[in-house]
Image (cartoon, rainbow, N blue to C red):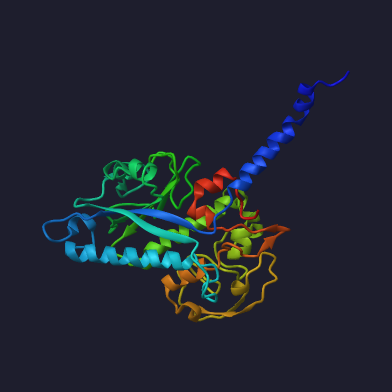
Amino acid sequence: MRATPRSRWAAWTPFLALLTAALAGAAERIPSSFTLPVLVVHYFPTNGTNIDLQATGDWGASLEATRAKTLRQTREALRALEEGSRYLGFKNASARPALRYEIAGSLEFLRPLPTFAKPGHRTPMTDYNRIALEARLQDWVENRGVREVWIWGYHGGKVDLWESNMASPHGDVSNSDRDPKDLPVYQHTYTVYHYNYQRGASEAVEDHMHQIEAVLNHVDGRDGAPPAQWPDLLFWGRFVGSDRSHKIVRPGCGWAHYPPNAERDYDWANPRAVLTDMDDWKPDGSGRKAPMDSSRWGGNSLRWFVYWMQHLPGPDNGLSWQGRPLNNWWVFIGDYDLARRLNLKLTE
């Protein structure tokens, strides 16, 4: 029977749908850099002019000194994170940051962190839902573009906390127990980082290191993979060089607690030298290997974090795995919503 014009177009419908989707994806490409507006929230329980030691457990400095310290460490963390996002910046002076941070606002509460009794925790848990209400996070996230919330608080055995905690329409991927109800979910993804003003900027940046690891492991499939398969994964097995033990079994680029030459957790000052391809990392293991010890980062944890981050494949990295170019991995930190919308993986 002779086909009518309508039936001829019907035959083309599946192809046109695929073409439309492909064009939409091409129009929304991965940017080379991302701007992250940050809301900084401070909890300073006071007993006059000083921080209340009874509330914090081990911090009783003056309110003025504590304000100055958190301001200084916010700036130090911001600089370190931007510097760390310069792909191979340790040897390429012209490398530009993939992440740009902007302080969108700053709030201060002169009272203790809100807490609640959480099952399984011996110490009162920080109530992030209450903080979201007190800080009016919905307005900051949905109307002012905030994508990260940096909380300056305390620990001291008085409160429990999560170093990072994500709220997202796509699910919680963070260095927490990933409770879907401990933060309100809005239209856009945002991540809460909980710092401790008894500590330094290095510990604040370490929170971000673990969030990067959590997100990249999730995207790479480690969350659902049997531990026996972890050494074969692109991020954890080939980039980090680890397995189910979390120790370095094939010196690659390491992770937050374990540089390539580390023998234990937090082993940032180990003088032991190992052969590693870290500075010429390629997914297939063909990169040039060279001796490396802690002198490369001066045995300093913050310098190690910056150095490690600069090895994460950034824009125009020129790397490929199994015939597929590697994406700019910073998209998963810079715009998680975009990454999920495009169903991005570590490779194109």
Q: Residue 22: where, in percent of width, then height?
A: 67, 43
Q: Residue 221: x, y in percent? A: 60, 50
Residue under the image location 39 percent in, 42 percent down: 142
* Left or right: 86, with 186 as reference point: right
Residue lying at the far top of the rendered structure: 1
Quarter of the view holding residue 284: bottom right
Tell whether 65 sits left or right of 293: left
- Relative to 186, does residue 32 appear above or below in the rendering? below
Q: Position of residue 303 (x, y in %)?
A: 44, 73
Where is residue 82? Give x, y as percent.
44, 65
Q: Nearer the viewer, residue 186 or 264?
A: 186
Quadrant in which residue 189 is drawn: top left
Q: Residue furthest right?
A: 1
Q: Furthest residue to the front?
A: 5
Q: Nearer the viewer, residue 247 or 182?
A: 182
| Foreground pick, 211 / 188 | 188
Q: How many marks?
A: 0
With 280 as the anchor, is 215 left or right in this view?
left
Quadrant (top left/top right/bottom left/bottom right) for the N terminus: top right
Residue 282 in view, yes or no: yes
Q: Is residue 118 visible?
A: no
Residue drawn 47% across the image and 77% down it: 297
- Taking the image as shown, residue 221 lies to the left or right of residue 109, namely right
Relative height, residue 162 to residue 21 (above, below)? below
